Image (tube, rainbow, N blue to C red):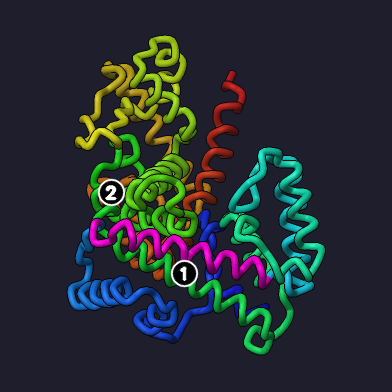
Amino acid sequence: MKEQKAYKLPGLNVIDLLYTTPSGIPFSRRVKRLQLGGPLEAKVLHCHEESVAVPYREIADNLLSREDEEELANEVLYYRHKFTRCLIKSREFRQAALTVIQNIYLFQNRHIFFTPEENPALERQQALELFSSPAAAQNLPLSKTLRHLVLARIWKRIIGNTDTDFFHDPALLELHSVVENLNCLRNIYVLFSTRLIRRLARRVNPLYKQSITYEDALQIGTFGVAKAAYRYHQSSGVRFSTYAADWVAREIQQQALSGRLIRISSNVVEQYAKAKKLNDAGLLAHYGPSLADASTILDDSRDSGHASAPTIPLHYPGPGNIVETRQQHELLVAVIDAKLSLRSANILKRRYGLPPFENNPQSAVEIAELYGLTRGRVYQLEQEAFKVIRKALLAETRAPLPL
């Protein structure tokens, strides 16, 4: 379907997000279409009106009571269940579901249903049998509702492979309506999480601040809340703010570490933080050298309620190290100028404060506005540039010494 290609988001890991055609229906009307309880609906509409009247206003997270969170979570689960039933009723949709389950879960012990089986192989077999029979949609138990990651991959495959006219296919329109309602519920969660996102963005670890700015952390944090909104259910035993905070921190960590010139595995960071909490000298010695290039020690104070500790150098550079660092810096700039296009080179220099922009590093949002690009496209150009630079630097180090 050609119309669908326009609103895909290249360069970002957004497989979890359910993208749809832009809606012309105002947010307030979409909220009323959900038919939420009277008090919750009034609360959502009031907060939305205030956020429109005062842009960037922080909405208090605690405005959502436990009862409100339970109602929203049940609504999300209801529409996920409805989505699953819609898949079973259509032959094309069932085929897409079977393909996803066979291809993705063939060698991975991942759960598929809302209430998983202890044996992943048995659960996969039940899923294949479920999507092989259209009669299963009539009495589909709530426990057989698809988990969000499976649902998102099936939806992406459906809208990416369909050749029919989107606005004349009743089955696709029904499924699209379910996705719009899911996204509306997601936006309600995001609306009430503005203060949470800002609070976590201010507490970004110094290790991550080297590759993302505060504005970037706000944008990435919104993606984290959105992913949490699709998955949250009160049966997890925690409030939504607690559940979403972990997703926000995880999303910021992944984006920050993947955007560094010197890449650091998120597993290394997590293991180092764990070793530091346990004061395990062996693990600290094992993972410490991997973080030496970052010149920071990770203080995982995310759950402590206090601000992150200041950056602590792992070693004090001597004159020889300073000269070597300067030479490496000059080599890097030379490679960027020689191997990248002018636009890609300038984007990378602006992003990381390289000459002539060393006094004014810019965020991905600012660069996107300057060049008329999306933030996703800026990240995509960065990743492409990193590949070219790594290849060039690797060739440089392997070059034979002059005789």
What's the magenta region? Answer: 62-86
Residue 243 included in the magenta stretch of the image:
no
Q: Position of residue 80 (x, y in %)?
A: 56, 64
Would residue 156 appear left or right of 354 to someone viewing this image?
right
Quarter where residue 229 is shown = bottom left
Residue located 59% across and 18% down the image: 403
Would residue 44 appear left or right of 248 to someone viewing this image?
left
Residue located 54% across and 38% down the image: 390
Q: Is residue 116 above or below residue 127?
A: above
The residue pinned by badge 2 equals 201
Q: Residues within 10 Å of mark 2 (few under 14, many from 20)?
A: many
Q: Amino acid at mark 2?
A: Ala
| Closer to the eye: label 2 or 1 | 1
- Viewer-nearest residue: 233 or 47: 233
Q: Position of residue 284 (x, y in %)?
A: 40, 16
Q: Is residue 9 visible?
A: yes
Residue 75 included in the magenta stretch of the image:
yes
Would residue 193 appear left or right of 5 to someone viewing this image?
left
Q: Position of residue 39 (x, y in %)?
A: 28, 73
Residue located 42% across and 79% down the image: 35
Residue located 63% across and 52% down the image: 113
Q: Amino acid at mark 1?
A: Asn
Residue at the limit of the structure toward the bottom, as seen here = 168
Tell me which numbered mark, 2 or 1, is placed earlier along the sequence.
1
- Viewer-nearest residue: 173 or 326: 173
Q: What label does residue 183 carry, if any?
A: 1
